[in-house]
Image: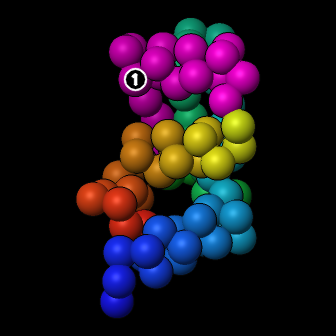
Amino acid sequence: MSKNKHKIDQRKQLETHPFTFKFTKDQKLIIYRNNQQIKIVKGKTSARFANLLENKADELSIQLALAKITGHYKHGNEQ
């Protein structure tokens, strides 16, 4: 399968099964997928993600950032 096919599949998967998130009062980032909590992060990672949101990133950029944080995005391929 070509690299371009992997990228297309990844974007489709992010569209059909997007990540959702929320911040807690103590600035922990909680990440969900398919209504299940999959990761909690804090510190620099949480702050970098908050900065991405403050800079009004588009939805795909937000989804890719969440995929990277959770480990679902490796070497350009969605797992």
Instruction: Name the quarter where the N terminus is drawn.
Output: bottom left
Q: Is residue 43 above or below residue 17?
A: above
Q: Quadrant of the C terminus?
A: bottom left
Residue furthest out toward the bottom: 1
**Magenta highlight on residue 26:** no
Q: Which color scheme is applied?
A: rainbow
Depth check: 68 or 58 in front?
Answer: 58
Characterize the local packing of mark 1: few (<14), some (14-19) or many (20 or more) Cα atoms within 10 angstroms.
Answer: few
Measuring from the top left, give residue 67's x and y in whole percent: 47, 51
Q: Going 64% across and 48% down the picture, which residue do you hit?
A: 60
- Going by the numbered disc 1, the residue's amino acid type is Thr
Residue 24 falls in image quadrant: top right
Q: Position of residue 25 (x, y in %)?
A: 65, 11
Is residue 32 visible to us here? yes
Residue farthest along the top direction in this orientation: 26
**Magenta residue span:** 39-57
Q: Count how many numbered circles sit on residues in the image.
A: 1
**Along the line of sight, the residue nearer the viewer: 41 or 4:** 4
Query: Is 9 on the left or on the right of 2, as rendered?
Result: right
Q: Secondary structure at mark 1?
A: helix
Residue 78 higher or lower than 44, as above or below = below
The residue indicated by pointer 1 is: 45
User: Measured from the top left, where is residue 5 in percent x and y?
Assistant: 46, 80
35 or 1, which lies in front? 1
* Quarter of the rendering containing residue 53: top right
Left or right of 47 in this view: 44? left
Seen from this angle, which residue lies furthest left? 75
Q: Residue at x 71, y 70 (%)?
A: 16
Along the line of sight, the residue nearer the viewer: 49 or 39? 49
